[in-house]
């Protein structure tokens, strides 16, 4: 009850006044005191009962909040889990990185964003061998041409690092089958013209270059790459400052700073741009290098680990060393999927095209089967804070 207007104490006081007044007026009837006492007791009991039966507005609000919370918990319990596939190595498991379910669902079902199942292959080239001599980590020119033609025939389109970052962070639209082509290390204009130029001219496929920001780089090589950058053919990104360094948690702090901060300084001097992606030098990384890269505001990191394709909020990583693939460092313990993105070698990519297509297809089917449940969750849990999902 409203204690400011009507309390049990005030009721008792008023009824006592009534009783005393009646007693003073007449004592001739000996049954009157009994009558008034009985009336007093019955009134108090009635008031107490009414207070129990009529909950206050505060109790109403608490009850409604409790029911709402219970409803949200029930909806949350039905939210589908992350998409799984049997097409990857069992040790390479998908990891998510978007912490808020509501933000993830809003980006996922925004009709202006990438469609569910949009998949990206990252391919890291070391050497394209146009001769007969053996080159380390190389692909023959015949296999290279087969790879490029197969990618195009299977519906893949090349993207750059800006597009990849926007897709991975916010699910911004990119081609449903996308490929990021990375050339590792410094190369001349002649190398790019012989190997990649025709695909840029025919299909508009640019190439990302992991550029070693060596302060002693030749002026001719630098000038050629500046022209390629301005043309839009080559998207230069960081790969440290020395060609021989491999970073790890055992690397000294000055070495990490030289490779990461030094690359930023070198890019400012040589290209007048700030790289957003680190192609980990010689495939080496660790918790401390990743932490330093984040502090320096790198947005993406690419390893040499061939674990599979990537999708929005979906990156295959490993928790432990695989004895059958000992060169692949486990990334999951670092807990930063965007800084440890997997990449295929070109030979591995040639064998994996059909697998990547199948993963994208089944991920799309899984998403569509889960759509109604996810939209129901969003309406119940997210809409009040994030607003309704955008309409087509």
Image (spheres, rainbow, N blue to C red):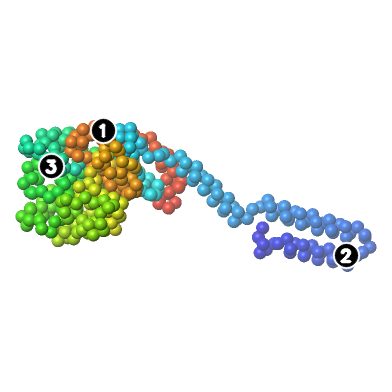
Comparing marks 3 and 1, which lies closer to the viewer? 3
Callout 2 environment at 10 Å: few (<14), some (14 to 19), or many (20+)? some
Is residue 78 toward the left or the right of residue 116 in the image? right
Residue 392 against residue 147 in the figure, above or below: below
Q: In which image quadrant can residue 125 be found?
A: top left
Q: Which mark is residue 23?
A: 2
- Counting from the top left corner in percent of width and height, residue 10 is at 74, 64
- Counting from the top left corner in percent of width and height, residue 281 is at 20, 50
Kindly identify which residue carries mark 3. Answer: 127
Instruction: Looking at the picture, tell me which residue is in the foreground, 63 or 147.
Output: 147
- Residues at marks 3 and 1, CA–CA distance in whole angstroms: 24 Å
* Badge 3 element: strand
Callout 1 environment at 10 Å: few (<14), some (14 to 19), or many (20+)? some
* Badge 2 element: helix
Which residue is pictured at 84% across the width and 66% down the height?
21
Q: Is any atom of residue 223 visible in this view? A: no
Kindly identify which residue carries mark 1. Answer: 355
């Amino acid at each position: 009850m409203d204690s400011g207007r009507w309390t049990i104490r005030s009721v008792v006081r008023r009824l006592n006044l009534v009783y005393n007044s009646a007693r003073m007026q007449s004592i001739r009837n000996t049954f009157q005191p009994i009558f008034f006492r009985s009336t007093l007791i019955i009134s108090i009991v009635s008031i107490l009962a009414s207070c129990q039966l009529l909950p206050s507005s505060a109790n109403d609000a608490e009850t409604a909040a409790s029911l709402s919370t219970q409803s949200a918990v029930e909806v949350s319990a039905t939210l589908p889990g992350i998409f799984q596939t049997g097409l990857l190595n069992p040790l390479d498991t998908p990891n998510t990185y978007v912490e808020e379910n509501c933000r993830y669902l809003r980006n996922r079902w925004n009709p202006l964003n990438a469609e569910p199942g949009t998949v990206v292959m990252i391919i890291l080239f070391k050497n394209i061998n146009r001769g007969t001599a053996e080159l380390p980590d190389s692909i023959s020119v015949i296999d290279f041409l087969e790879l490029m033609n197969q990618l195009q025939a299977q519906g893949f389109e090349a993207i750059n690092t800006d597009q990849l970052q926007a897709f991975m962070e916010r699910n911004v639209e990119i081609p449903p089958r996308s490929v990021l082509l990375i050339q590792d290390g410094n190369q001349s204009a002649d190398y790019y013209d012989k190997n990649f130029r025709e695909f840029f001219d025919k299909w508009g496929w640019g190439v990302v270059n992991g550029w070693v920001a060596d302060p002693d780089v030749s002026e001719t090589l630098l000038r050629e790459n500046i022209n390629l950058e301005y043309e839009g053919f080559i998207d230069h990104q960081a790969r440290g400052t020395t060609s021989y360094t491999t970073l790890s948690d055992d690397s000294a702090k000055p070495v990490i700073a030289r490779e990461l901060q030094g690359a930023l300084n070198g890019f400012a001097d040589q290209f007048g741009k700030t790289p957003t992606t680190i192609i980990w030098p010689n495939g080496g990384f660790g918790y401390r290098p990743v932490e330093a890269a984040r502090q320096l505001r790198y947005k993406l990191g690419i390893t040499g680990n061939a674990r599979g394709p990537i999708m929005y909020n979906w990156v295959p990583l490993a928790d432990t060393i695989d004895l059958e693939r000992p060169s692949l460092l486990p990334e999951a313990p670092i807990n930063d999927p965007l800084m440890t993105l997997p990449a295929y070698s070109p030979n591995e990519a040639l064998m994996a095209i059909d697998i990547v297509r199948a993963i994208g297809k089944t991920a799309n089917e899984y998403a569509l089967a889960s759509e109604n449940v996810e939209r129901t969750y969003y309406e119940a849990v997210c809409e009040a804070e994030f607003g309704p999902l955008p309409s087509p």
